[in-house]
Image (spheres, helix red, strand yellow):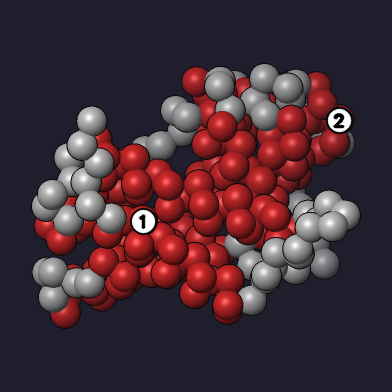
Amino acid sequence: MATPDTRTQILDAAEHLFAEHGYRGTSVRAITKLANANLAAVGYHFGSKAELMAAVVRRVVEPITAAQCTRLDTLLARTLDPPVSELVEAFAGPLFDEMPAGDEGGARASRLIVTILSDPAEEARSWTGPAEDSVRERYFAAFARVLPGLSPEELWFRMRGIFAVTAVDRLQVHQQPSPGCVSPVAGEAARQWAITFLTAAMSAPPIRP
């Protein structure tokens, strides 16, 4: 097996450390030490720690985004008003596919997604680009058509919930359960439970303040 190049080694090390310690809790020195690279390599390959964070997150998220786009294309080619359950499946399904149980890469991906959802550092949230924005806006428009009673703010809140619920579930699958707790389910049952739960959450009546 070929040894990963320096850029890939830095990405791997940064993904591990950002997922474990967050953006501010991870130093460039710690990344280069784990990657067995010199400090200047981060600047050479990425420009800055913030740009490295963006590259790490995009490497994890791009396959998910591409799969979400493909599934939405397939769905909308059949009907412009698909059932909410099918939209949820198209949106959430790739998260399960790219964060499989029993896979270390899936474990890192789930930890990283939970980190970017919760990390207070602006750099953890400023990584998105045109591709991510486009897919998010397309799903937002599709959900808005089939859930016209929801305000834009509430609809976006529920869509963020899909990411949060799925990422936390996948993260727990890779962790050792606490004593006395029921172990998370890793297989197809968990996926179906999640889709059913999230469909009900997305379909609930609007909450009026």
**Residue 206 x %, y %:** 21, 46
Question: Label for residue 118?
Answer: none
**Residue 69 x %, y %:** 32, 62
Residue 126 visible at all? yes
Q: Please name whichever residue, 119 or 16, is drawn nearer the observer in this view of the structure.
A: 119
Q: Provide the secondary structure element on which disc 1 rests.
A: helix
The amino acid type of the residue labelled 2 equals Lys
Q: Is residue 170 above or below residue 43?
A: below
Task: Name the quarter where the C terminus is drawn.
Answer: top left
Q: Please name whichever residue, 31 or 180, is drawn nearer the observer in this view of the structure.
A: 180
Within the image, what quadrant is residue 56 found in?
Answer: top right
Taking 129 as reference, is 9 left or right? right
Taking 196 as reference, is 179 left or right? right
| Residue beneath disc 2 | 33
Disc 2 from disc 1: Cα separation: 44 Å
Q: Is residue 205 above or below residue 186?
A: above
| Residue beneath disc 1 | 201
Which callout, 2 or 1, points at the residue further toward the start of the chain?
2
Question: Which of the two marks, 2 or 1, is nearer to us in this view?
Answer: 1
**Residue 63 x %, y %:** 48, 59
Task: Name the quarter where the N terminus is drawn.
Answer: bottom right
Residue drawn where x is 74% and y is 42% of the image: 16
Q: How many numbered marks are there?
A: 2
Residue 46 visible at all? no
**Which class describes the residues within 10 Å of circle 1: few (<14), some (14-19), or many (20+)?**
some
